[in-house]
């Protein structure tokens, strides 16, 4: 009797697990279709290396415009986009959305931001462990702070695009990818600090990395804030509206320094740095 009851309990648990898994998968696919997610992780080794070079050394990179995917019978590059059921941008004039990152280095991806985010948490834990300040809560606290920074940035950008009536070809996933590239500069700064390089050199590396990230966003988000002049959405933009959008774009770029500081503050022991400078 006990064996039968136990077996019945196991079968019921397996059934509930299967039902729960199916429910989660169904709702996850409704919120974030897998074809969309695969698009942002469709990268190659050469893309990753080239993208990292652009993020860290964006000064002379050209062009910044993203490439469109065309159908066999498509003509020129399309400019009127609509949201497809799968969540991928499509165009009415032959373009079938943007090319994946593997085929276009200017396309945003989620592979680099995800890997950089995870590595940031690991490196932070290693640094605190070497300084005998690590405790299990550090992982959650650092991850929560980083996610909160991304959430604040995305909310500010979406609010700004709404108030300025900006309608472009971007998606929330694009903005999430662009927001995640800041972890690359954060990692470079932390690795320099891990080599016991502090003071002026440390903060110079920090300022350079986030100045590069600011310039990268300034050029990459231009197509979001200032759509292509040939698109119908940009024909009604007045000079005053364009000026406000440019100011908004510069604000996004400049605030990266603040976000970067929030990501690294408190990781290294500040008293040691202060004593060394004194």
Image: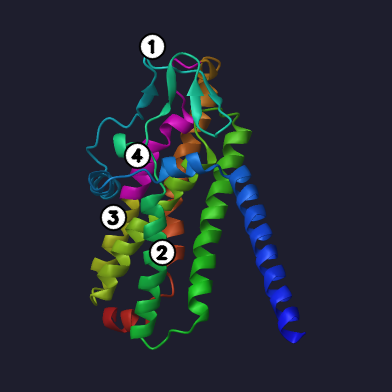
- Check disc 2 and report the residue beneath it: 118
Considering the numbered disc 4 on the image, is that residue within a helix, a strand or a loop?
A: helix
Residue under the point 51% across and 54% down: 150
**Numbered circle sitting on residue 208:** 3
Considering the numbered disc 2 on the image, is that residue within a helix, a strand or a loop?
A: helix
Task: Mark 3 and mark 1 in contact? Answer it, CB < 8 Å.
Answer: no
Q: Nearer the viewer, mark 1 or mark 4?
A: 1
Q: Residue 109, how many percent across, how many down?
A: 39, 44
Q: Residues within 10 Å of mark 4 (few under 14, many from 20)?
A: many
Q: Nearer the viewer, mark 4 or mark 3?
A: 4
Distance (Cα) linking label 4 and label 3:
26 Å
Task: Mark 2 and mark 1 in contact? Answer it, CB < 8 Å.
Answer: no
Determine the main secondary structure of the stretch shown in magenta. Answer: helix
Q: Is residue 261 above or below residue 271?
A: above
Q: Is residue 132 left or right of residue 160?
A: left
> Residue 236 magenta-drawn?
no
Q: Is residue 173 above or below residue 111?
A: above
First in sequence: mark 4 vs mark 3 = 4
**Numbered circle sitting on residue 73:** 1
Q: Is residue 50 above or below residue 185?
A: above
First in sequence: mark 2 vs mark 3 = 2
Q: Nearer the viewer, mark 2 or mark 3?
A: 2
Which segment is the magenta one?
Answer: 212-231
First in sequence: mark 3 vs mark 1 = 1
Distance (Cα) linking label 2 and label 4:
20 Å
Distance (Cα) linking label 3 and label 1:
46 Å
First in sequence: mark 2 vs mark 1 = 1
Q: Is residue 228 visible?
A: no
Distance (Cα) linking label 2 and label 1:
43 Å
> Residue 216 magenta-drawn?
yes
**Numbered circle sitting on residue 101:** 4
The foreground one among 174 and 199 is 174
């Amino acid at each position: 009797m006990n064996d039968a009851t136990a077996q019945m309990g196991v079968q019921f648990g397996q059934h509930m697990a299967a039902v729960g898994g199916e429910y989660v998968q169904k709702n996850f696919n409704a919120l974030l279709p897998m074809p969309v997610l695969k698009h942002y992780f469709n990268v190659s080794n050469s893309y990753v290396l080239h993208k990292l070079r652009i993020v860290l050394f964006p000064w002379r990179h050209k062009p910044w415009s993203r490439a469109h995917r065309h159908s066999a019978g498509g003509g020129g590059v399309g400019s009127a986009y609509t949201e497809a059921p799968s969540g991928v941008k499509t165009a009415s004039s032959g373009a079938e959305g943007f090319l994946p990152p593997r085929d276009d280095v200017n396309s945003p991806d989620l592979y680099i931001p995800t890997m950089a985010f995870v590595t940031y948490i690991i490196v932070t834990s290693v640094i605190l462990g070497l300084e005998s300040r690590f405790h299990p809560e550090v992982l959650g606290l650092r991850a929560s702070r980083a996610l909160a920074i991304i959430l604040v940035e995305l909310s500010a950008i979406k609010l700004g695009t709404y108030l300025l009536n900006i309608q472009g070809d971007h998606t929330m996933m694009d903005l999430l990818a662009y927001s995640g590239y800041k972890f690359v500069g954060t990692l470079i700064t932390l690795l320099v600090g891990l080599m016991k390089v502090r003071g002026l050199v440390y903060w110079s590396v920090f300022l350079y990395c986030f100045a590069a990230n600011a310039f990268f966003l300034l050029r990459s988000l231009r197509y979001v804030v200032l759509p292509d002049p040939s698109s119908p959405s940009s024909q009604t933009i007045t000079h005053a509206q364009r000026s406000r959008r440019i100011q908004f774009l510069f604000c996004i770029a400049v605030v990266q320094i603040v976000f970067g500081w929030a990501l690294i503050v408190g990781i290294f022991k500040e008293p040691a740095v202060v004593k060394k400078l004194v």
